Amino acid sequence: MSEPAIELQDLEVVYRVRGVDRRVLRGVTLTIDKGESYGLVGESGCGKTTAAFAIMRSLPRNGRVVSGSIRADGEDLLAMGEADVRRLRARTISMVYQNPAAALNPAIRVGSQVAEVFRLLGAEKDESVERTRAMLEKVQISDPERVMRRYPHQLSGGMQQRVVIAMALASDPTLLILDEPTTGLDATVEAEVLDIVAALRLEFGTSILFIGHNLGVIRRMCEQVGVLYAGRLVEEGATKEVLANPRHPYTVGLLRCIPRGGLSKDRDRLDTIPGYLPQLGADLPACVFVGRCTLARDVCHTDEPPLHALGGGHSSRCHFHEEAAALARATPPRAERAADAPTGNGPVVRLDHVNKTFLQEGQQVAALVDINLAVERGETLGLVGESGSGKTTLARVLLGLTSPDQDSTIELSGQPLEAKIVNRDPKQVQALQIVFQNPDSALNRRFSVRRIIGRALKKLLGMEGETREKRLREIAESVRFDAALLSARPVQLSGGLKQRVAIGRAFAGEPQVVVCDEPTSALDASVQAAILNLLADLQADEGVTYIFISHDLGVVRFLSDRIAVLYLGRIMELGGAEVVFNPPHHPYTEALLSAVPTLEGEERPRIKLAGETPSAADPPSGCVFNTRCPRKIGAICETEEPPLAEVEPGHFMRCHIPIEELRQLQATVPPQRATPTPG
Amino acid sequence: MTTIEDPAAPIAIPIRPDEASVARRERLRLLLRSPTFIIGCVLLGVWVVCAIFGTLIAPQNPQADDILNKLVAPSGDHLFGSDRLGRDVLSRVMVGAREILIMAPIATILGTVLGTAIGLVTGYYRGLVDEAIMRLVDAVLAIPLIITALLAIVALGPSRITIILVIGFVFAPIIAKTVRAAVLSERELDYVQAARLRNERSPYIMFAEILPNVMGPIIVEFTVRLGYAIFTIATLSFLGFGADPSIPDWGKDIAEHYQFISADVWWPVLFPSIAIATLIIGINLIADAIAQTFER
């Protein structure tokens, strides 16, 4: 058992693109011991997934290992023949991908798919079914018989990922590779899946290679972490040590980009990493990070930094690692803006008894239930909640893309808004805009940036010719988009630039309210920081109101003045950002917050939510949260729906428990519900 | 809007220089390297040259009767032999390309334009409009193309216009289905919502925003349909419903001579048949190659 589970030695991988070999991994050396959990972090394009594919011997056809070695359990993996590789994948190394829906065969029942793994390992039919049931129980599927009869699409994302993990662990592998296994999942579901992986890892003694971009998750899951940049491991060490005391400027920068508790757009700016990741396979003779490093000196351009051992297994590939912590900020730390956004003249948006019921297969599905909200001018209202909570429906109703039920009232600056956008006054249409989550979908890929923004100027402001071109350049400047690129098409731009174009388009018509629907969730941490700073700057300058939707609580907290927490289409809690983020919370908010792993890794007791989110087609009686609430007080929760009451000035909550009692309860140990309630 | 001082804001850009045009060139390069495409182009090219210069390069007058040399087997005088009136089969095959290569593309373009419009409207609006038009489309598709065409020609009389219109109208629903499918996924993208949020009219959204993004499937569909159009036109003239009986025509020539096959006179049938086959195969090879490059 002395052999490490996996050992990469100077691994070099190239992809052949248009006849040229492009280096993707540049001499990666890492070792994962038996039973160890190793986190591999870095922004997209750094080569994380390529490393995983190399280990699985499943590089894409144009990729190949040019030098170095991979040893699994002492065996030379690169020397293996096809049959051995199959045996390796079946028994020694398993991989869990980001998208569980794509990893499962949609046409085969879950039970048969998992059982097949056991059959491949030589089990008889009955035995394989029996072992499948046992394995599904291990991943905490409470009713394995029922799940086994289902097809993958009939399961939620969290359930699907559990099934995939069950399949991956079925062969009791030496190494389990997890490639962003929780990226598409809600925070509470993510927390559950991570708990399962952590528990099973101890039970099976499996080594883990955890690929991720969320440092909080890595902090929670891995003892060791490696930071990958442009295909090179720039820093490595014990996770706690690396995150608390980073010694490579890239790690320092990455950590500073993340909006953490206590930072707010009114006072602070997030730091960013200047510049961009070098292109795939670019020639990087010296330090790979030199182009973006504020510490860089002459030697960094000429000499490749050696791996400096810093003791305790911590190592950094930086000439000036001892100065890394003092890395100069790329952006000024303080935001020079007035703390108070310009307000007055009453709320800019008011929603009064807004309901939205969808008709799905003859069933009434209440997506929004009695939403009452007033949003002040220049304010940011954060909308938080798990998927299916109605956040996006609320935004679409406001924008006029989805019609609310009769008797719902929406007002813009005191004027009623028609349900359908075609019936709205042009001024009202102009006043409400949106920045979508995915700029690839939001920008017409056949149009140039000039046409995308120019068209908005023409339609919304009636601008033509010279005036329009001038205004276009002003907008480009304000979203910090190089005017020389106005003729480019979206495919030519990086993700961050595309999102700047989308923001520019949203601001082109001088809107009063901009809905931001997860505008940074498709972006890397450093790009996210730049976009969040930009949104805050634009708001300070233009006095625009944001409705900010995000599942990333840190991001919401940074940008929001007030936050509304939604659950099954109802507002459960509403209040100032800091009020919502500090106790006393609504029990649901409390659970959401506790599910988010922090960078500091403070030992917060986790509140586990029982069961899955109930269907909006058949919401629970009484308080809709009662089926999962860890603080349920009794029958009243099941029979009577609590009103959204003002528990403190400006702080609204939908809970039967008095605020003072919540305050006391949440000051002490949180409750744990032992028995999961069937969803 | 004032500008914000942000020294670190990434303005210098990692633009992938003309990635879009590189991708387009790449696609073209792949196409030009594909053997399927090259063979297809050679086959089509031969017939296009015949269609344009047929009368000039044909060795003899395709209409000149020579009753003394009827049904002469292929020889030095008549490379492809002569037909029942002693006309040179080679010349007739060469000149015969013109009619079919004019009518088929016009009919296909008509069908593609109509079909694209129907597909865009039904895919974009969905709902009742979509249901109504699509049921009508299903009804048209239920009847074999050749029967619809025969009925129409019998009713309206054979003429170039009739044949073009009939083929165009029958192709339109087929193409509409393909376009509609592409539009259905395209309309879910956020740029369509963004257009609605700036008060764009539906025709603009359909034709200016969505259409450029569904050109790929439309081009593929056009090429595939072109092959079918040639086949249909040849079939119609074989059945005696050709537009103009006075000019050389592959289908008609086959029809007029197939009874001679039993007498071992195979050349007036074989050579026009090969002409039809090579033209259709050529176009289908091109269609395959184009579809493959779009799929990549």
Image: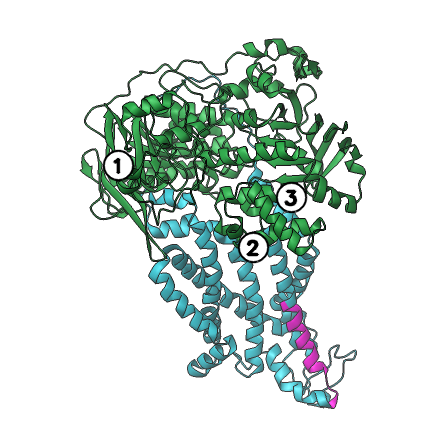
Q: Label 2 is placed on what type of residue?
A: Arg
The Cα–Cα distance between marks 2 and 3, rounded to whole angstroms, is 17 Å
Give the labeled residue for mark 3: A170
Q: Chain of mark 2?
A: A
Chain letter for cyan, please: B
Label whose residue precedes the other's in the sequence (2 or 3):
2
The Cα–Cα distance between marks 1 and 2, rounded to whole angstroms, is 41 Å
Q: Are marks 1 and 2 on the same chain?
A: yes
Disc assigned to residue A109: 2
Disc assigned to residue A642: 1
Chain letter for green, please: A
Foreground mark, 2 or 3?
3
Task: Estimate the x, y position of residue A308 in percent, counting from the top left.
Answer: 69, 14
Residue in the foreground of this view, choosing between A642 and A346: A642
Q: Residues within 10 Å of mark 1 (few under 14, many from 20)?
A: some
Label whose residue precedes the other's in the sequence (3 or 1):
3
- Colouring scheme, one of rainbow, by chain, secondary structure, one colour: by chain
Q: Chain of mark 1?
A: A
Does residue A405 sit above or below A648 in this rendering?
Answer: below
Q: Quadrant of residue A555?
A: top left
Residue range highlighted in magenta: B263-280
